[in-house]
Image (spheres, rainbow, N blue to C red):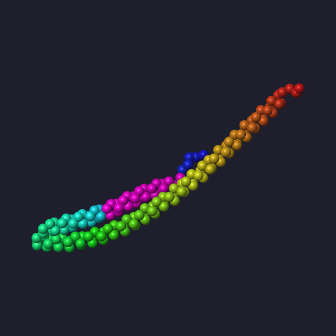
Amino acid sequence: MKKFQFSLDKVRHFRQLQLGAEKVKLEACAARIRQIDDAAANLSSEKSTAIASLHSGGEAASYESFAAFSDYSERARRQLQSLREQAVAAFERQKSAVTIARQKLEVLEKCKERALDEWKAEFMREQEDLASELFLAATARRIRAARREAQTEPPP
């Protein structure tokens, strides 16, 4: 019997590569969210530092600078929030793409398993047939040998 060969192996390999690529894209989306969160944390830290320095003895110019910084930080916070929402939406879309790629691969993996099981069953049937044929051939040889012996022996 010939060696097991799955006819869709190249497609299965392609699906594995595709799943890997989708996972890399998903990780990039997660990294983008972390990057935005880090930027938001830095902005918040800068605002806290500015408030602390203002409370420690600010002058009129400091209040004007703080007001301008406060306006800037609020715009930046809203922009970062918007970017985060977009990044989370992209992450969710990519998570769906990974799920779909995984399902496509699983279908091929199940097909391969089924084909391998069928191949093994056919192999076992062939082995059983071969064993039966060998047994019958050996039995036939023994019968022929016994008949030849019976013919060559003188009668008592």
As drawn, is 113 to the left or to the right of 44?
A: right
Residue 8's spot in the image, x, y percent? 51, 55
Residue visible at 89% across and 26% down? 156
Q: Which residue is farthest right?
A: 156
Q: How many marks?
A: 0
Residue 68, quarter of picture: bottom left
Residue 98's spot in the image, x, y percent? 43, 61
Query: Can you see residue 59?
Result: yes
From the viewer's side, name the closer residue of 92 and 7: 92
Residue 14 included in the magenta stretch of the image: yes
Instruction: Give the vertical position of 24 relative to 81 (above or below).
Output: above
Instruction: Give the vertical position of 125 relative to 39 (above or below).
Output: above
Is the magenta region chiefly helix, strand or loop?
Answer: helix
Residue 60, quarter of picture: bottom left
Query: Can you see residue 50?
Result: no
Residue visible at 60% across and 46% down? 1
Instruction: Give the vertical position of 2 relative to 110 (above or below).
Output: above
Residue 53, quarter of picture: bottom left
Residue 134 included in the magenta stretch of the image: no
Q: Which residue is farthest front?
A: 56
Residue visible at 39% across and 64% down? 94
Instruction: Please give the range of residues in magenta.
Output: 6-34
From the viewer's side, name the closer residue of 29 and 115: 29
As drawn, is 71 to the left or to the right of 142?
A: left
Residue 23's spot in the image, x, y percent? 40, 59
Residue visible at 21% across and 67% down? 47
